């Protein structure tokens, strides 16, 4: 989460692991993700980030 903070992303919760395959799936065939809740980026009237 330090890397996200270094790039200006505000983490607002704990990471969660998402597993899509059963445990007996071969490791190189597994689909796993880590979800990290982040703060919403404010947008201007045109839908673009400020800057």
Image (cartoon, rainbow, N blue to C red):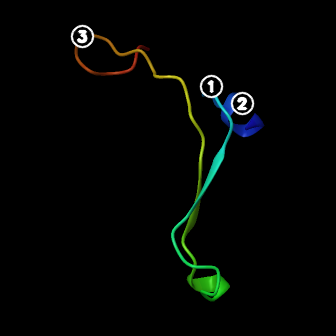
Disc 1, SS:
loop
From this viewpoint, which residue is outermost toward the right?
2
Position of 8 compared to 45: left or right?
right
Mark 3 crowdedness (10 Å alpha carbons): few <14, some 14-19, many ≥20: few
* On-image quarter of the N terminus: top right
Q: Position of residue 39 (x, y in %)?
A: 53, 23
Disc 2, SS:
helix
Q: Quadrant of residue 48?
A: top left
Total marks in image: 3
- Reading the image, the residue beneath label 2 is 6
Q: Position of residue 41 (x, y in %)?
A: 45, 21
Q: Residue at x 77, y 35 (%)?
A: 2
Position of 13 compared to 40: left or right?
right
* CB-based contact (under 8 Å), mark 1 and mark 3: no
In the displayed structure, would residue 25 be above or below residue 5? below
Q: Position of residue 22 (x, y in %)?
A: 57, 79
- Reading the image, the residue beneath label 3 is 45
Mark toward the start of the polypeptide (2 vs 1): 2
In the displayed structure, would residue 46 be above or below residue 17? above
Mark toward the start of the polypeptide (3 vs 2): 2
- Reading the image, the residue beneath label 1 is 12
Q: Mark 2 to mark 1: distance in Å? A: 15 Å
Residue 24 image label: none
Mark toward the start of the polypeptide (1 vs 3): 1
Which residue is at the front of the view, 4 or 19? Answer: 19
Q: Residue at x 60, y 40 (%)?
A: 36
* On-image quarter of the C terminus: top left
In the displayed structure, would residue 51 be above or below residue 18? above
Q: Position of residue 23 (x, y in %)?
A: 64, 80
Q: Quadrant of residue 43?
A: top left
Q: Residue at x 70, y 29 (%)?
A: 5
């Amino acid at each position: 989460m330090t890397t996200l903070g270094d790039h200006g992303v505000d983490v607002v919760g704990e990471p969660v692991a998402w597993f899509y395959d059963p445990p007996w799936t071969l490791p190189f065939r597994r689909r796993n993700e880590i979800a990290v809740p982040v703060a919403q980026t404010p947008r201007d009237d045109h839908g673009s980030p400020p800057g």
